[in-house]
Amino acid sequence: MNPILESLYPDKTVLARRRLVGLAQLVPCNDAFVAYLHEEMRQCYLNGHDHAALVTACALIDFAVKDAIEFGLFVKADCVFDAGEWDKIDQLRFGEVLKLAKSRGVITKAEWKQLDWLRQHIRNVYMHGQTPDWIKDKDDTIIEGDLATGEAKEQTVSVRDNIVLQRHIRIVADRNVCDEIVRLVDGFVRLLGTRAITALEEWKLKNPSKPTVAQVERVLENMQKQGLQADLIITSDFPVDMPPPPEGSTHAAS
């Protein structure tokens, strides 16, 4: 936990409630980088690093939507990767990505509205280190003391006009919005992943696996004879009866 956040918004039962509800790892997942960012978000969230969880959630949803667009093109192209198409998608701003995802049926109009709200009010400001207007537009009650008279009184002030209040409220706001944003992003990432896996499985039904385990084993045997070692195997297809990879290694389809 961050002691600065805890001094302004003591944990009490916040983390206990988060851990009780839980946030599962992203399994299965068809993209290692999506899983990596999701795990970063998950661990920050469950350990009370709220700002880190929020910023990682923004990076995660940005990449996950791009990945979903590319994966849709990949499956339609009979699982052939087009570097040029990916480069075009990869360099888009998040607003452009959302419009493209909606136009290609990757997300629905209702989902686009939710993600565009996230873009405007959370993603854009958090990723640029900006204080959100929804914090600046608040009013807050403070106690103001007069050193000359010793008088003290409550006064309502605009947060926009008080830089110290802006900083404090911004820290507290992280804890207030963290649950909502992390759960929202987690749900979308799982939904996009499920759609991608479903699309791939449907393609596989129409295009049965051609390699055999014997062919793969022959390549692995030759690697071993030459003293070659690899911890990541990238292939366009896996035999359906391929055994799981050895511990410490990874299979990746491309």
Image (tube, rainbow, N blue to C red):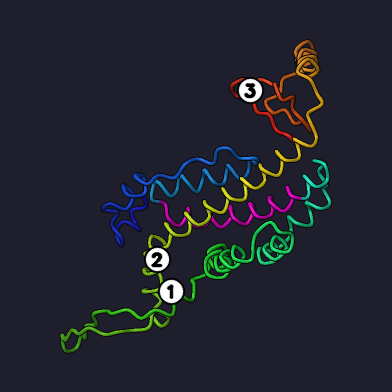
Depth-wise, is mark 3 or mark 1 nearer the camera?
Answer: 3
Q: Position of residue 103 (x, y in %)?
A: 73, 64
What is the quadrant of residue 163 in the picture? bottom left
Q: Residues within 10 Å of mark 2 (few under 14, many from 20)?
A: some
Disc 3 element? loop
The mark nearer the N terminus, 3 or 2, is 2
**Residue on which the image places disc 2:** 173
Q: Position of residue 174 (x, y in %)?
A: 42, 62
Q: Residue at x 78, y 46 (%)?
A: 74
Depth-wise, is mark 3 or mark 2 nearer the camera?
Answer: 3
In this rendering, position of residue 206 left or right of residue 10: right
What is the quadrant of residue 29 in the picture? top right
Q: Residue at x 78, y 15 (%)?
A: 214
Residue 68 lies in the magenta-colored region:
yes
The mark nearer the N terminus, 1 or 2, is 1
Disc 1 element? helix
**Type of residue at label 1?**
Ile
**Residue on which the image places disc 1:** 135
Residue at the extreme bottom of the image, as rendered: 149
- Please report the bounds of the magenta region as a residue range: 49-72
**Residue on which the image places disc 3:** 244
Q: Which mark is residue 222?
A: none
Residue 55 lies in the magenta-colored region:
yes
**Type of residue at label 3?**
Pro
Q: Magenta residues: mostly which secondary structure?
A: helix
Q: Residue at x 41, y 83 (%)?
A: 161
Q: Position of residue 193 (x, y in %)?
A: 62, 46
Q: How far is the residue under mark 3 from the one under mark 2?
A: 45 Å
The mark nearer the N terminus, 3 or 1, is 1
Contact? badges 3 and 2 (CB < 8 Å):
no
Q: Position of residue 127 (x, y in %)?
A: 56, 62
In this rendering, position of residue 240 left or right of residue 24: right
